[in-house]
Amino acid sequence: MEWFGLYNYWIVVVLMMVGFYIVIAQGNLIKKIVGLNIFQTSVFIFFISLAKLEGGTAPIHVEGVSDYTNPLPHVLILTAIVVGVALTAVGLALVVRIHELYGTIEEDEIHAQDEA
């Protein structure tokens, strides 16, 4: 069972598909934002999994250590998390404005009001 040792990649695929399904299948705008956040989290886990070097240590010079893990991907993911939180806040603010304008946050009801 060599493939089971890559459990973090299986988690990434499951989270990605769950997030994608929520975005596609749900009509509620807040649920769509939650789905996007789940999808985004799977991408974060994927990049961090790729950045980890087996047997690597922190990039601090120590005698006898030759394998170091690059900290740059981890730092970039921290930045992406901050940007993701900001985009979630903007998305929720837009949902509030849409609710004020249309009185609903259901996608099909908004389309029906636009057509009328």
Image: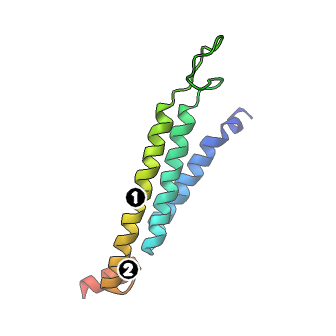
Choose mark 1 or mark 2, whichever is in front: 1
Does residue 26 show up? no
Residue 69's label in the rendered image is none
- Whole-percent x and y of residue 83? 40, 52
Q: Is residue 90 left or right of residue 39?
A: left
| Label 2 element class | helix
Identified at 62% across, 24% down, the residue is 57
Foreground residue among 59 and 39: 59
- Whole-percent x and y of residue 77? 47, 42
Q: Earlier in the sequence, mark 1 or mark 2?
A: 1
Foreground residue among 70 and 53: 70
- Label 2: few (<14), some (14–19) or many (≥20) C-alpha neighbours in 10 Å: few
Quadrant in which the C terminus appears: bottom left
Identified at 60% across, 41% down, the residue is 9
- Residue placed farthest to the right in the image? 1
Q: How many marks?
A: 2
Identified at 26% across, 82% down, the residue is 114
Residue 56, relative to residue 65: is it above or below? below
Residue 74, relative to residue 55: is it above or below? below
Question: What's the residue type where badge 2 is placed?
Answer: Asp
| Rendered image coloring scheme | rainbow
- Residue labelled with disc 2: 108
| Label 1 element class | helix
Foreground residue among 15 and 101: 101
Q: CA distance from mark 1 to mark 2?
A: 27 Å
Does residue 91 show up? yes
- Residue labelled with disc 1: 86
Residue 56, relative to residue 97: is it above or below? above
Quarter of the figure with residue 85: bottom left
- Label 1: few (<14), some (14–19) or many (≥20) C-alpha neighbours in 10 Å: few
Q: Is residue 68 left or right of residue 91?
A: right
Question: What's the residue type where badge 1 is placed?
Answer: Ala
